[in-house]
Amino acid sequence: MVAYVTQMLWKSVDYDKAYWNQCVDFVRDFSASNYLPIGTFNWSAINGWNSGSPFNSHWQRVFYKPGLVPSEGDIVFFKTTTKNKYGHVAIAWTNSTADSLTIVEQNAGDGNGDGKYADAIQIASTPYRNGIRGDVAGWFTYLK
């Protein structure tokens, strides 16, 4: 996982070749590259969360509660906001705590999917309750 993230930082990926470089594209590419297959999320991050764990029996859905911390490699889902009706999805990274979440994400800037600048794949730190990205709904963790 570390090697994949290191090689992808400040780049972008359009996994499904539709709608440019979206957050879901990065998560799907990350999962495929690390042999943790997932589905399409039905075209948006929030649909992936709302539909439960549709990908396969190896993913477990965890609802966020204060004090819970996702593990490195978990798929973290953010709720919708007034400016973003699609939600957001990212990969949990090292150094997450009960107060602050460290993630690897794509398309977090202005959300236009161009894959440049703040929309490129990057590591970020964010609170679990966030008006810009949206509050964390929870995450999917891969059961080995």
Image (cartoon, rainbow, N blue to C red):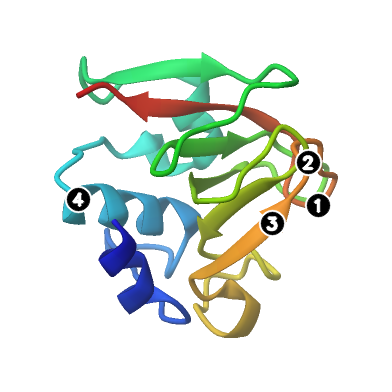
Disc 1 to disc 4, C-alpha distance? 29 Å
The amino acid type found where label 2 is placed reads Thr
Quadrant of the frame with the N terminus: bottom left
Disc 4 to disc 2, C-alpha distance? 30 Å
How packed is label 3: few (under 14 Cα within 10 Å), some, or many (20 or more)? few
Disc 1 to disc 2, C-alpha distance? 7 Å
At horizontal 14% and vertical 45% (from top left) the residue drawn is 35
Q: Are marks 1 and 2 in contact (CB under 8 Å)?
A: yes
At horizontal 54% and vertical 84% (from top left) the residue drawn is 116
Of pointers 4 and 2, the one earlier in the residue sequence: 4
How packed is label 1: few (under 14 Cα within 10 Å), some, or many (20 or more)? some
How packed is label 4: few (under 14 Cα within 10 Å), some, or many (20 or more)? few
Disc 3 to disc 1, C-alpha distance? 13 Å
Q: Mark 4 points at which residue?
A: 34
Location of residue 87 in the rendering, given as x and y in whole percent from the top left corner: 62, 41
Is residue 32 found left or right of 4 in the rendered image?
Answer: left
Of pointers 3 and 1, the one earlier in the residue sequence: 3
> Can residue 82 be seen in this snapshot?
yes
Location of residue 123 in the rendering, given as x and y in whole percent from the top left corner: 56, 65
> Can residue 53 be seen in this snapshot?
no
The amino acid type found where label 1 is placed reads Ile
Label disc, if present, on residue 132 of the rendered structure: 1
Q: Is residue 117 above or below residue 130?
A: below
